[in-house]
Image (tube, rainbow, N blue to C red):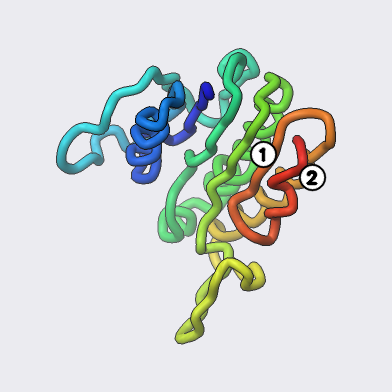
Amino acid sequence: MRILITGHRGYIGTVMAPLLANAGHEVAGLDSDLFEQCTFGDSPREFPSIRKDLRDVEVADLKGFEAVIHLAGLSNDPLGNLNPNLTYDINHHASVRLARVAKEAGVKRYLFSSSCSTYGAAGDKILDETAEFNPVTPYGRSKVLVEQDVAQLASRNSARCFCATPQHTEFSTAAI
């Protein structure tokens, strides 16, 4: 399968891309390289790459891919608190736009990587993926909004959609 991983140079993408490639998939990446100088240890494995801001992705960038695994975004709660508007612009609006553009490009599968920040602060309580959403930061709220908005793109006749939390697993067999 030909897969595009957004954020393939991030902390999850640098692990996921080689795993998928080693499993026989054709992997390419899309990353703005915002944190280009922030790697420790050995350099990550190289893959064909599109260096582009998530907000600037076009249909042509996604043509020919069978799946998009969306990992890119401004990561973590402190960074989201630093500039909430930028967090919503990139993590929410650009992520939903990416799903729409992927659908328009004919991408058959779209996987959005969410976050435990959607569940908020639990104190001493142990939460699992069946807990209710209770985000307390712009980062967490942006992830909830993406899940809700991308789920609305589901249709029976085009690409398959999966949002990576149990609240939306019913869309794992739906189409976008």
Quadrant of the rendering where the C terminus is positioned: top right
Residue depicted at 50% across the width and 84% down the height: 125
The residue nearer to you, when weighing 160 against 105, is 160
Q: Which residue lies most toward the right here?
A: 156
- Residue at 71 percent of width and 27 percent of height: 103
Q: Which mark is residue 35?
A: none
Mark 2 or 1 closer to N-term? Answer: 1
- The answer, for residue 32, to whether it is visible in the render is no
Quadrant housing residue 162: top right
Q: Farthest residue in the front direction? A: 23
Q: Is residue 73 above or below residue 138?
A: above
Tell whether 13 sits left or right of 105. Answer: left
Percent coordinates x, y for residue 163 in the rendering: 64, 48
Q: Are marks 2 and 1 in contact (CB under 8 Å)?
A: no
**Disc 1: which residue:** 96
Task: Report how far apart the C-alphas of labels 2 and 1 lie in the structure.
Answer: 10 Å
Q: Residues within 10 Å of mark 2 (few under 14, many from 20)?
A: few
Residue type for callout 1: Val
Image point (72%, 30%), residue name: 159
Residue 81 in view: yes
Number of callouts: 2
Kind of residue sitting beneath label 2: Gln
172 displayed left or right of 77? right
Residue farthest to the bottom, as pictured: 124
Q: Secondary structure at mark 2?
A: loop
Residue 109 position, x and y percent, is 64, 33
Expressed as whole percent of the image width and height from the top left, the position of residue 66 reads 60, 24
Q: Residue at x 42, y 33 (%)?
A: 20
Query: Dot 2 corresponds to which residue?
Result: 152
* Spot occupied by residue 43 in the image (x, y as percentages of width and height): 20, 32
